[in-house]
Amino acid sequence: MPYSLSFIFLLLYLLMCHVLPLRATLAQWDLILEPIAQVALKEQVEHKQIAKEEQSSLEPLVLERLKDVLAERYHLNGKVVLTPLVHWNVKLSESDWSIELVNAPQRLMPTTAFNIRIIQNNKVLASNKNWMLQVENRVTCLCARHNLIPQIAVDFREFKTEERNLLNTSKRPFPIDIEGAFRLKHRMAVGDILFEDSVEKQALVHKGSSVDVFIKKGYLTLSLKGIALDSGDLDEIILVRNTSSNKTFRGRIIDANTVQVAF
């Protein structure tokens, strides 16, 4: 119990027991309350001193520089967020210093202990061998607004952009500014992140589909039916098999399900 509260209870006890006169003079009250006032003043000074020491700590600057070190070492995209679980009251007089990560962990975890050295001209200015930090790697992602079924064309209006922590996944989020026609490869639930492996490019010709084949040789043009052995988009070259002769040849996609072969 703080000293100030102890003095207050003692004062009340003395008053209730009629040890002190109920009508004390100002001088008497000053004498009674002086120890309480001194304790209260001492507590205020201590709080101000602690607050001043916390403000003078360079922990925020150390965290900012450590973010750059982690982003480069672990190839992190997006924003790195570090939250100390135990604060480091580090003070440095020099301004030209760098951070050294000692025995860096092979993989970052949501809660990671770092061995940090702050060095200048190969001299260690400060160190923390067990700095516990909460680590996040926040990336802007496309997230499903509704449940989506596979094999449908991707309509980007069905997605919203959200900042998600992707520290624990090796998947790459689908770029939010890419153009083109794509379709979903698997089902998605509300809030699921759209990753690169969640979609495939929507081709004009799909592997295994029937295609019209035009063969040109000089002024002669022949048409036949074939089976696409590859998927492809406009002007791409794919392999096609003749359904009649089973011979294979390469042709250029000129429109949906149409391939042209030139000799």
Image (tube, grey):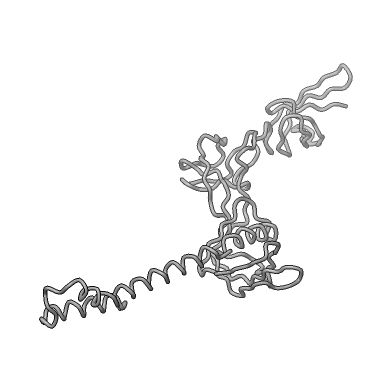
- State the quadrant of the C terminus: top right
Note whether 207 is above or below 104 in the view shown: above
Note whether 110 is above or below 13 in the view shown: above
Please count the marks in the image.
Answer: 0
Q: Is residue 210 left or right of residue 143?
A: right
Viewer-side residue, 204 vs 250: 204
Q: Is residue 204 left or right of residue 39?
A: right
The picture quadrant where one finds residue 239 is top right
Note whether 139 is above or below 19 in the view shown: above
Residue 158, given in percent of the width and then of the height, sits at 50, 37
- State the quadrant of the N terminus: bottom left
Q: Residue at x 77, y 23 (%)?
A: 223
Residue 240, given in percent of the width and then of the height, sits at 77, 35
The picture quadrant where one finds residue 260 is top right
Residue 201, given in percent of the width and then of the height, sits at 65, 38
Residue 228, given in percent of the width and then of the height, sits at 72, 35
Note whether 18 is above or below 43 in the view shown: below
Viewer-side residue, 65 vs 120: 120
